[in-house]
Structures are given as structure tokens and as C-alpha cells.
Image: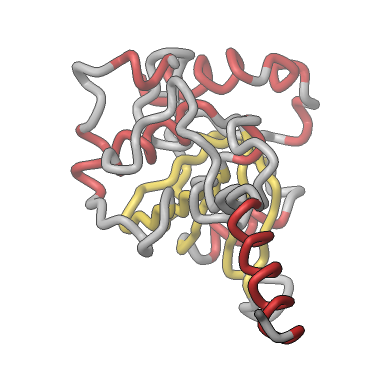
Amino acid sequence: MLSPARFVLAAAFLLILRLPAPAPVSAARPIVAGKPAPSEATATARWLAAQNTWGVVSTISSDLNGAPFGNVVSYSDGLPGEGHGIPYFYLTTLDPTARDALEDERTSFTLSEFPLGTCGKIDPENPTCSKLTLTGKLKLVDLQSSEADLAKSALFTKHPEMKDWPKNHHFKIFKLEIENIFLIDWFGGPKPISPSQYLEFGRNQQSVMSS
């Protein structure tokens, strides 16, 4: 006959065997249709740039003695379905971002997948909710150039109200000349992407840009 102590242990063991297995902890949301797979880092970076309409531009502040200054800014990298990867901005020197860039062009531009609604219920900092930082130089675009026409069309298509912004604010077109790319889209740290890989991607893969 089992002693009382052994009887309790045996009963507990049988109870454990009958319990359902715990549900696995979800560390990441499923891959969303239209978003490139984690193995396609360059495609993901271009997808983020094409799908978003705003991000955070960080400059070296001329008003804060060189401290970093981040500002929410609208942008476009091209017409819908025809993104080129280069972010264009419509800025006025009444805003510190443009003033900073005219004094020191060094700039970074950060995008998150979270505003697109494809991250589900996970936290924006979760590695599977992609984030992209493009670093380089924020430069004025010559308003008399064909590039300015392209940039203006891209910006006004995604942001129609820009056309009616006050003329006496003297808005100008800026672009980010990309020198470094930082992408997190899964576990394991940032993905290595060169500016040339980023800019050349998608020339024959417009479906990624328009998804």
C-alpha cells in the first residue's frame, strides 16, 4: 500500500499528465500578405519606404547647440506603385528641420511598419515589426530641374494639401542622399544593405512597391 506522501505525488503526476499542453508563446506576428519575407531585407526596406507617408527626420540642431533634434515629417519616394527609394520632403525654413539641414546636412530618417497596421497587436519595438533608418545628407533639390518636377508630383500625389500650403512660407524640396541603411525586420540584429542595393532594387519588381 502507498504511503500518504507517495499517494499525493502519484495523484499529482496523473493530474499533470491530463492537463492540456500550454499554448506556445507568440514572439512574432505572422508574415503579412504583401510584406516581403524576413529573408528579403532589401525588399522590406523598399517596401517600408514606398508604403509609409511620414517618418521622423533627425538633424543636428542649430538651435540646441548641436543636440539631436527629431521631427515628424511627411515625405514621398515616388508616385504610388513607382517608388524609387529616395525620400523627398517639402520643407520651409520656418521649421527647424530645414534650417538645420542648410547648416549641417547630416541627417537620419526613421520609418516604422507600425503605422501601416501590419504589425498586429505586438509592440512597435518588437523586432518583427520592421523599422528602417536611412542616414545621409539632406539636400535642396534645384526647383528648375526635372528631378524637382518628379519630386513635386510624388509629394503632391501622396499629400494633396501641400499644394495649398502658404506661398509666403517659401517651401522648398529636399531629398535625402542615402549613405547608410539600418533595417530590423526580424530577430538576429540589423540586416546588411548597401545604398546601391537599396536604390537598384525594384526596377523589375514593381509589385513590391505597389503592394
Pick whichever, 15 or 166, lies toward us. 15
Q: Position of residue 150 (x, y in %)?
A: 42, 18
**Count of marks placed on residues:** 0
- Lateral position of residue 142 relative to residue 172, left or right: left
Residue that appears at 35% across and 21% down:
208
- Lateral position of residue 72 relative to residue 102, left or right: right
Q: Quadrant of the N terminus?
A: bottom right
Residue that appears at 56% across and 31% down:
52
Residue 39 falls in image quadrant: top left
Pick whichever, 19 or 116, lies toward us. 19
Residue 59 lies, with reference to residue 88, above or below; the image says below
Residue 29 lies, with reference to residue 189, above or below; the image says above
Q: Position of residue 45 (x, y in %)?
A: 38, 40
Q: Is residue 154 visible?
A: yes
Residue that appears at 74% across and 50% down:
95
Q: Is residue 26 visible?
A: no
Q: Position of residue 164 (x, y in %)?
A: 77, 17
